[in-house]
Image (tube, rainbow, N blue to C red):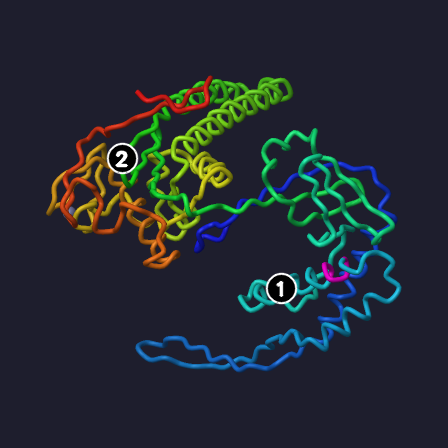
Amino acid sequence: MPNKNKIPTEIILTYKVKHNYDLKNLPNNFLKTLNEAIDIIWNNINWKEKTIKHRYKVGKKYKYYKTTRLIPEIPKDNDFKRELRNHLLKGWEFASHYIDGAIKTAYSTINSWKSNYLNGNREINKPTFKRPFVRVKNTLIRHDKENGNIRITIKPRKEYLVLNIKDAWFYEKIKNFNVGEVILKDNEALITFKRQLDLSDKEVIIGIDSNLKSLDLYHSEKGWIRVDLSELHRIKGIYDVIIDRLKSIYKKSPKRIGKLLKKYYNRRKNRVNDFINKLTSQLSKLFPNAILVFEDLNKFNMYGKNSKFNRDLDRSNWRRIAGKLEYKSVVIYVNPHYTSKTCPVCGSRMKSQEGEVVKCNNCGEFNRQFVGCFNVFKRGIKLVEKLLGGAGVPVTGVKVDDLLSDEPRGELRLMPPNPDVSYIVDLNGRALLQV
Ligand SMILES: [Zn+2]
């Protein structure tokens, strides 16, 4: 998952390819060296005692008690690092950059152990790696884009491994990407591909709210746009009926029905995936210059009530739609708290109501789905401004208090219950169809 507090600046994709190159024990040696590096760093940790004050309430008064914790200080000075590197290089027969990769991995492993330990999620247990692998730094990789060759130096000027990805199924997707790090194992390689995201062409912000039968978008120039999802709903419905029926007779013949269930679960999944793939590529094609704003689904857990998901699209599909779009567009996430209950005009909290319409005591009635995507949009603008800083916002035509281009600043007209534009996903074509 990407960092939610940053505008993503690059797209990273990872693919696996098989190879049958003899790595001459490199993965095993790397594993040994990595664990040795962890050992050495671990043994040089300086444990500092720290007194921590706790308090608890008895009646109206607080009582205090103290405990002592050991806080690890990880050795980081250059002398230590140089000595560590020299020590690990002794007898190392492969490229020395692998040692740097091992040290980097050792540090990041211990640092993540430390933050877990400080949060109380881990004991004082030294982390160790068990399975052989090699982390190949970028400096050991030559990427020949034209021929699809990725050359990895095993021993400088002596031994190379060449992976050709021209015929790989993912080649089209990463044609314009650069190769990042590679994780090598005995029979396979995990290759990371990266592409910088250009924010300079991003001119609009779109807030997106997912509902059961529609994806509701609020576009900073075009206003409310809907994409019809009833076909997705229908596809799922068909398979749900079949699956429910099979479940009800499961006991009669568990083996046979089990097989059928698996078959229909797969078909359901494939058809849903197909729909979402088309939806997301058609969307990103229609709005190539947009920053897309979604609600941060992980934050729903924080607020106990998941009423949204009783009503709306199930969580996994929504996650998938946002996740797929991350590879095709710039996606950011905002706090979902009360997005469907905040009045789009005055910002006051509206009461929970059933049905299509929500009502603000000061401002009147609104369409629920419009309110959802509009509030996501508003939070998106604020986040973009915060992240990119006031002056450098690459977003024209939108400001928090300047929402509709044809309205005086700071004022909002009530949106009609129907959006101006609506689309359906074309299952046979490449572009969303306007209806
Ligand atoms: Zn209001």
Q: Check disc 1: other Cα within 10 Å, few if <14, some if 14-19, many if 20+.
A: some
Q: In which quadrant will I find the C terminus?
A: top left
Based on the displayed image, in which of its 4 quarters is residue 147 positioned? top right
Residue 202: x and y in percent read 39, 44
**Residue drawn at 42 percent across, 20 percent down:** 426
Q: Which mark is residue 222?
A: 2
Image depth: mark 2 or mark 1 in front: 2
Q: Which mark is residue 380?
A: none
Q: Check disc 2: other Cα within 10 Å, few if <14, some if 14-19, many if 20+.
A: some
Which residue is at the far front?
146
Please, what secondary structure does the residue beneath circle 2 have?
A: loop
Q: Is residue 207 magenta?
A: no
Instruction: Answer above or below: position of 105 versus 60.
Output: above
Q: Nearer the viewer, residue 347 or 69?
A: 347
* Distance from the alpha carbon under mark 2 to that under mark 1: 48 Å
Based on the displayed image, in which of its 4 quarters is residue 195 positioned? top right
- The residues colored magenta run 98-102
**Residue drawn at 80 percent across, 70 percent down:** 86
Q: Earlier in the sequence, mark 2 or mark 1?
A: 1
Residue type indicated by callout 2: Lys
Q: Which mark is residue 113?
A: 1
Judge left or right: residue 399 versus residue 33: left
Instruction: Answer above or below: position of 197 versus 417.
Output: below
Please, what secondary structure does the residue beneath circle 1 have?
A: helix
Residue 218: x and y in percent read 29, 38
Residue 345: x and y in percent read 17, 46
